[in-house]
Image (cartoon, grey):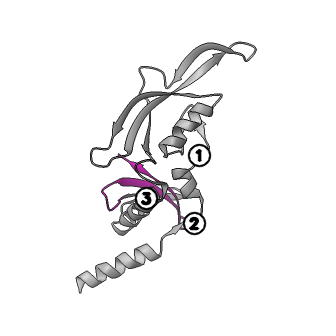
Amino acid sequence: MEGKIKGIEASLAKDNIKYKEGYYVEHLTGEVEKCTNRHGVSDGHNYDQFKKYFDNSDQYKLEEVKRVEHSDIKGIYDIEYRLKIETKDYRGQGTGEFKFVPKEGKDPLRKTVYDPSVISNEQIIKLGKEAMEDGLLKKQIDELGYQDKIWGTSSNGLKFEGFRNKETGEISNFYPVI
């Protein structure tokens, strides 16, 4: 009987999960929409899109400090990076000199990304949904004001974090973590 109850709970958990349409896909796989000195890149987990943002940015350039591949899953990397910003003169013109954010000596920014030539956008979305189901089923949830933070693991062992809006019940985004 216990096995059936677990099966029913698992089925209900999967069927009741709602995702904020479009947004979670764009956050995970799409172009970088936002980068700040304080937090760095807030989306752009697709490594090609992450690099493309810096290649095309007038404000920021990428200074990769360290890139470590996941110990068990090819195509998943933890990147430590700094923002390279050209200093301006009093007229707002570039000086050809650069500063780094965070400064050298401070901990760099971090981002977990996937290589879309190894793991497709469709695969990373599928793995993320599996991990959100896992986290909800195992009740691996922290309440954070207006949203819940969910931790889960996909079928291939990749861990994800995600956020669910308490008011709508929708998962607004999720991303891989090492």
From this view, report whether residue 52 is shown above or below residue 123.
Answer: above
Residue highlighted by disc 2: 167
Structural crowding at the residue carrying mark 3, measured as other residues with C-alpha within 10 Å and reported as few (<14), some (14–19) or many (≥20): few
Q: Which residue is mark 1?
A: 31
Q: Which mark lies nearer to you, 1 or 2?
A: 1
- Indicate the amino acid at tag 3: Gln
* Residue type marked 2: Glu
Left or right: where does residue 137 sit relative to residue 58?
Answer: left
| C-alpha span from label 1 to label 2 | 27 Å
Q: Amino acid at mark 1?
A: Glu
- 21 and 90: which is toward the camera: 21
Mark 3 lies on a secondary structure that is helix
Question: Which label was assigned to residue 118?
Answer: none
Q: Is residue 36 visible?
A: no
Q: Nearer the viewer, residue 174 or 141?
A: 174
Q: Residue at x 62, y 13 (%)?
A: 96
Mark number displayed over residue 123:
3
Residue 138 falls in image quadrant: bottom left
Q: Position of residue 84 (x, y in %)?
A: 54, 24
Could you tell me which quadrant the C terminus lies in?
top left
Looking at the rendered image, the quarter that the N terminus falls into is bottom left
Element type where label 1 sits in the image: loop
**Residue 169: percent from left, percent from top:** 53, 67
As drawn, is 66 to the left or to the right of 16? left
Q: Position of residue 71 (x, y in %)?
A: 27, 44
Residue 60 drawn above or below residue 3: above
C-alpha distance separating marks 3 and 2: 29 Å
In depth, the one of 19 and 126 nearer the eye is 126
Magenta residues (range): 153-178
Answer few, some or many: residues within 10 Å of disc 2's Cα (few below 14, many 20 plus, some between 14 and 19): few
The answer to which image quadrant residue 157 occupies is bottom left
